[in-house]
Amino acid sequence: MSNRKISIIVPAQAVPEGKGVTVHRTIGRAGLSELDPFLLLDEMVIGADDAGTGFPEHPHRGFETVTYMLSGSMRHKDTAGNVGEIGPGEAQWMTAGRGIIHSEMPTSEGVDIRGFQLWVNLPAADKMKPPRYQDIPYGDIPTIAGDGYIARLVTGELLGENGPVSEIAVNPLFADITLLRSGKIIVPVPAGHTAFLYGINKAYQVGDDQVPPRAIAVLKDGNAVELTAEKDTRLLLVAAAPIGEPVARYGPFVMNTREEIKATLDDWNNGRFL
């Protein structure tokens, strides 16, 4: 077994986003503009008393958005006719493809809303595919029992079991891991895949490197990662196959060339987006 080491640690940066929301951004900020095939990682925090905040209607093209909730609930609605509400431990995986307009707005009251949004790039061959939406309720996400940990598996394969999100080009792994004991644990990771960790509640170690919560630890290659942490430490483990294609990016649009971005803006400005 070849344990992965840390390549870089990037703490989150607070950024205003949507309508009155502060997100804590690690991928998609200065110092880590992208991490093939990942384009953005935000931890969103909306206070229980922050009325009227959220993410009103906005467009996307050329990639996929993943929303995963820790607390509170959010409602998704899009121009393809999809509507869904997710709460703690639930996820939405939206393939924007050739174009979609969606909103994600809070629905819970009296509780802080906390969750993640991850942007996953699409290969050139899939960028103009029809939009698709996958709503994954709590009961559909398996809890995998490992040696010293449990993992809520949204997508990918772990210890012989598979998550419910399917047919994603980059073959991703997305796991919400909680340690059941203090000390060392080893979690398998697909070799050759870009992979990172994100601490949700406590600091932890990979090898000799200490990683604070609310920071991304980008991992070098290998087929496993050895973690040292306290009991009840919770973190995300995310991995996917790199695409290796050029990225042209303009706000919520991600294509391969500047010419494609210009065509996307022309489509958007002239009502040909969907």
Image: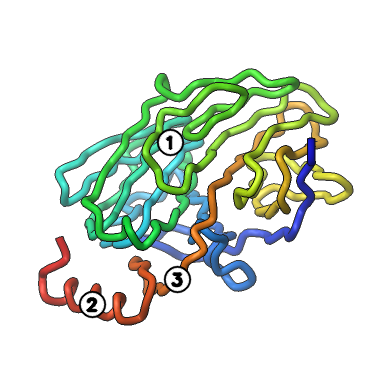
Which residue is pictured at 49% across the width and 58% down the height? 243
Which residue is pictured at 61% across the width and 52% down the height? 194
Which residue is pictured at 52% across the width and 29% down the height? 153
Q: Position of residue 172 (x, y in %)?
A: 50, 42
Horizontal relation, residue 268 to residue 124: left or right: left
Residue topped by disc 1: 72
Q: Quadrant of residue 145?
A: top right
Residue topped by disc 2: 263
Q: Residue furthest left?
A: 271
Asked if residue 137 is positioned above or below residue 81 in the image, the reply reads above
Asked if residue 270 is positioned above or below residue 118 in the image, the reply reads below
Is residue 247 or residue 238 the one in the foreground?
A: 247
Q: Secondary structure at mark 3?
A: loop
Mark 2 vs mark 1: give the one in front.
2
Q: Amino acid at mark 3?
A: Val
Q: Amino acid at mark 2?
A: Ala
Horizontal relation, residue 204 to residue 213: left or right: right
Residue topped by disc 3: 247
Q: Secondary structure at mark 2?
A: helix
Crowdedness near tag 3: few (<14), some (14–19) or many (≥20) residues, C-alpha within 10 Å: some
